[in-house]
Image (tube, rainbow, N blue to C red):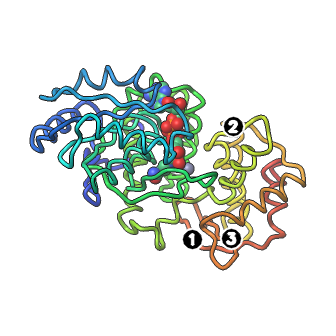
């Protein structure tokens, strides 16, 4: 039994979002379709989820309507205004109206653009998220943020828009590439670090590539994320804890996109960001060094250790200045007092940056 000490609920209703897990969730979706009687049913996929997920998804549904499957290309580039235009056009072409239902079947790219397109087409049609990547299950598909990128700025255009329900079926992870599992795992670790020591203790000792019983892990992560979102939906204060590791993480991710042949995954970048934040936490918030070292060991085991020379470090620090979580030109970090106790809005002296990178690279 993985979760002897954790009370789990089968379903939770947060801010008009119900999240259902496993096979019984399909009955909930069938019921939703029956009771709301949509005029038309659409399923949005990307190329991969059209090939690998849509058939098994539709086999478990019993809709009175034949769904129209829409497809976008794989990857972040699809989160564009041009792609939105194409989807709005296709919805019009297939006769969508305000009583249609859109089901987003895919990773975070599909749930982000799908939620945005649903919220904007004819001032809003209802939608359901069926996440198929680990990252989308534990993060992107829940919490109400939807949107697209604008130029080189990620998630710059968007709306808060909550799905009618979220259906999470871990069976979809079977076809997900290992690199995507490892990348999504960083968010799971983050959830433990910011709010649940038992969950961190459990997950930090698991190899994410060996897990077969995913449901309780995903459910715990979803409950943590939605608990945070419920307390502060519009990210005025406490929701910022979800940015743990993401301040430096985003800067590192952008840096590696621009300056290296080898892009770093979101998870690997956030992993490094969590180690840097752990070091700051030791220096400024009394986090014990052994915990910071454990975080480093787990991140190193998952993603290896990258080397950042002084030029790279300076460039990454410049990119921090663009982070949207800054206020008054100063960078705000989420730090830990202990595992499970995260503190938002911490300023970190610049001279600690280099020492934090040294700690990440060498462990001392
Ligand atoms: N809205 C939010 O709160 C939120 C939170 C975190 C991330 N995001 C967004 O999510 C996106 C990243 O999500 P992602 O990592 O899922 O990326 P993604 O949607 O690009 O999926 C990653 C890859 O896995 C493939 N894939 C998905 N499910 C699959 C399956 N079951 N089998 C095989 N292949 C599958 C996809 O086709 C893609 O190639 C980013 O755009 C990010 O900004 C949003
Ligand atoms: Zn993230």
The secondary structure type at the circle numbered 2 is helix
Q: Which mark is residue 159?
A: none
Name the quadrant containing residue 69. Answer: top left
For discs 3 and 2, the disc positioned in front in the rendered view:
3
Residue 107 location (% of width, % of height) = 45, 37
Check the picture and name the quadrant holding the C terminus.
bottom right
Task: Write the residue at 89% across / 54% down.
Answer: 311
Task: Write the residue at 78% across / 51% down.
Answer: 360
Please tell me which residue lies in front, 86 or 125.
86
Q: Is residue 51 visible?
A: yes
For discs 1 and 3, the disc positioned in front in the rendered view:
3
Residue 84 location (% of width, % of height) = 43, 45
Check the picture and name the quadrant holding the N terminus.
top left
Q: Is residue 202 visible?
A: no
Contact, CB < 8 Å: mark 2 with mark 1?
no
Instruction: Give the distance between the C-alpha atoms of the residues marked 1 and 3, in whole angstroms.
Output: 11 Å
User: Circle 2 is placed at which residue position?
Assistant: 303
Badge 2: how crowded within 10 Å, few (<14), some, or many (20+)?
some
Please tell me which residue lies in front, 144 or 207.
144
Task: Write the residue at 81% across / 67% down.
Answer: 352
Q: Image height check: is 67 above or below 251?
A: above
Q: Which mark is residue 344?
A: 1
- Left or right, 55 with reference to 136: left
Task: Write the residue at 72% across / 43% down.
Answer: 257
Badge 1: how crowded within 10 Å, few (<14), some, or many (20+)?
some
User: Circle 3 is placed at which residue position?
Assistant: 331
Name the quadrant containing residue 101. Answer: top left
């Amino acid at each position: 039994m993985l979760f002897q000490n954790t009370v789990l609920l089968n379903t939770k209703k947060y801010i008009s979002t119900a999240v259902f897990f496993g096979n019984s969730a399909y009955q909930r979706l069938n019921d939703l379709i029956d009771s709301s009687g949509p005029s038309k049913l659409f399923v949005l996929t990307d190329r991969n989820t059209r090939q690998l997920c849509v058939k098994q998804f539709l086999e478990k549904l019993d809709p009175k309507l034949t769904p129209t499957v829409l497809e976008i290309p794989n990857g972040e580039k699809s989160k564009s205004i041009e792609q939105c235009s194409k989807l709005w056009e296709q919805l019009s072409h297939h006769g969508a109206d305000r009583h249609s239902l859109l089901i987003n079947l895919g990773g975070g790219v599909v749930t982000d653009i799908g939620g945005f397109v649903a919220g904007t087409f004819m001032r809003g049609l209802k939608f359901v998220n069926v996440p198929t990547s680990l990252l989308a299950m534990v993060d992107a598909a829940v919490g109400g943020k939807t949107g697209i990128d604008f130029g080189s700025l990620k998630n710059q255009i968007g709306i808060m828009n909550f799905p009618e329900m979220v259906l999470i079926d871990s069976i979809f992870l079977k076809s997900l590439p290992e690199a995507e599992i490892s990348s999504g795992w960083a968010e799971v670790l983050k959830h433990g670090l910011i709010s649940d020591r038992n969950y961190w203790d459990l997950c930090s000792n698991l190899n994410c590539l060996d897990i077969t019983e995913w449901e309780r892990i995903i459910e715990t992560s979803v409950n943590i994320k939605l608990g945070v979102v419920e307390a502060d939906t519009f990210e005025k204060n406490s929701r910022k804890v979800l940015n743990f590791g993401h301040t430096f993480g985003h800067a590192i991710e952008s840096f590696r996109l621009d300056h290296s042949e080898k892009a770093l995954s979101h998870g690997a970048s956030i992993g490094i960001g969590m180690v840097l934040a752990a070091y700051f936490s030791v220096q400024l918030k009394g986090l014990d060094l052994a915990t910071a070292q454990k975080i480093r060991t787990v991140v190193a085991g998952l993603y290896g250790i990258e080397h950042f020379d002084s030029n790279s470090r300076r460039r990454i620090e410049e990119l921090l200045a663009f982070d949207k979580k800054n206020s008054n030109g100063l960078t705000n970090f989420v730090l830990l007092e202990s595992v499970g106790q995260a503190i938002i809005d911490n300023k970190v002296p610049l001279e600690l940056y280099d020492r934090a990178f040294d700690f990440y690279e060498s462990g001392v």
